């Protein structure tokens, strides 16, 4: 005899064949045939005589499956499981079982304890249901055919989940609502958020003049362009603005006070006082307090 009416179920890396309708009057199993091909990490099978209590999983071989001892049982349920090594690593679409049929008669079902009224017709209906209705095979590793990883995947969730079911979520939302934030719209053209989430200076415009150290000369130049310094000022190596020598005149309306060296090749007109806490590396004349001061190589020659 041959039986091929197996239901095929495929999920993730597992392919299972099972018979929803039991095999009847099986004396012994001769062999099986399938069309499997490719790579499988395991091929296993198990059996049951009542679709409730099952044997342990065994390695699927011709010898193992033909060794099932029926013990004169009338029904036989089988599950054959193929486990792939990876997605699409193998394929199997059919499973056929060849067996020797026995001459056993259909067993009489006589469990009537759950029938309150021992009516003849009720007993007949009960026996008929018991004979022709079988429970679905349950895999303890799945729920409705899906493993736990399927239910843990958020993409498979539908509907709404109350905030109260997520520990600490409501408190976190309340803390965010009561916090003070810098709104993006308030940054204008001067500041931006950098890739690390820190507030940075934008060099998109010349709106604000700021001091930065020498490592940011490019940004500094955007705010105080070098071209605007003329011949009298320059940025030193430390990023500070300093007076430099020129070939023209230096006119100061007020007091001129320096703690460094003044180097100018020309005249100085100061309508106030002139102080130098260091040397004056300059040769020429300058006016100070309505007097003409002549200096040569940093030494005052005359005051007229």
Image (spheres, rainbow, N blue to C red):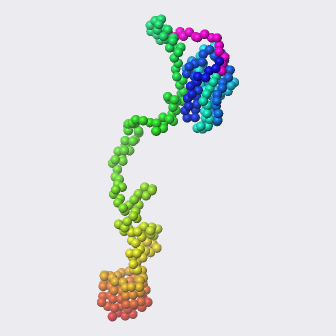
In the rendered image, the vertical position of residue 212 relative to residue 68, given as above or below? below
Residue 92 in the image: state x and y as whole percent. Answer: 61, 31
| Along the line of sight, the residue nearer the viewer: 71 or 281 | 71
Q: Is residue 190 left or right of residue 64?
A: left
Foreground pick, 123 / 236:
123
Residue 13 within the segment the image draws in magenta = no
Q: Quadrant of the N terminus?
A: top right
- Look at the picture and state if 296 lies above or below 158: below
Q: With respect to residue 175, does 205 lie above or below?
A: below
**Does the magenta run of residues contain 110?**
yes
Residue at 53% from the left image edge and 15% from the top image edge: 132
At a point 43% along the width and 72% down the height, the residue shown is 239
Residue 204 on image: x %, y %: 39, 64
> Residue 107, how many percent across, how many down?
58, 10
From this viewpoint, which residue is outermost toward the right? 63
Which quadrant holds residue 14?
top right
Residue 50: where, in percent of width, then height? 57, 18
**Majority secondary structure in the magenta region:** loop
- Residue shown at the point (58%, 31%) measured from the top left: 15
The reply, left or right, for residue 264 in relation to residue 289 is right
Q: Quadrant of the C terminus?
A: bottom left
Part of the protein shown in magenta: 98-112
């Amino acid at each position: 005899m041959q039986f091929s009416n197996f239901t095929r179920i495929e999920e993730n890396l597992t392919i299972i064949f099972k018979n929803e309708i039991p095999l009847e009057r099986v004396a012994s199993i001769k062999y099986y045939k399938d069309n499997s091909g490719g790579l499988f990490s395991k091929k296993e099978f198990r059996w049951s005589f009542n679709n409730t209590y099952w044997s342990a999983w065994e390695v699927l071989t011709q010898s193992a499956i033909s060794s099932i001892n029926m013990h004169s049982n009338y029904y036989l349920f089988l599950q054959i499981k193929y486990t792939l090594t990876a997605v699409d690593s193998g394929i199997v679409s059919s499973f056929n079982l060849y067996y020797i049929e026995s001459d056993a008669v259909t067993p009489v079902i006589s469990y009537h304890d759950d029938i309150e009224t021992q009516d003849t017709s009720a007993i007949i209906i009960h026996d008929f249901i018991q004979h022709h209705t079988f429970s679905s095979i349950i895999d303890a590793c799945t729920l409705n055919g899906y493993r736990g990883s399927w239910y843990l995947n958020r993409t498979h969730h539908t509907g709404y989940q109350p905030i109260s079911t997520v520990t600490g979520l409501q408190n976190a939302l309340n803390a965010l609502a009561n916090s003070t934030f810098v709104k993006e719209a308030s940054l204008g053209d001067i500041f931006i958020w950098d890739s690390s989430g820190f507030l940075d200076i934008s060099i998109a415009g010349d709106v604000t003049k700021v001091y930065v150290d020498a490592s940011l000369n490019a940004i500094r130049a955007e705010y105080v362009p070098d071209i605007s310094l003329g011949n009298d000022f320059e940025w030193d190596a430390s990023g500070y603005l300093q007076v430099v020598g020129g070939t023209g005149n230096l006119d100061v309306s007020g007091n001129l006070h320096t703690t460094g060296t003044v180097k100018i090749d020309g005249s100085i007109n100061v309508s106030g006082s002139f102080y130098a806490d260091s040397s004056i590396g300059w040769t020429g004349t300058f006016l100070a307090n309505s007097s003409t001061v002549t200096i040569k190589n940093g030494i005052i020659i005359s005051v007229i």
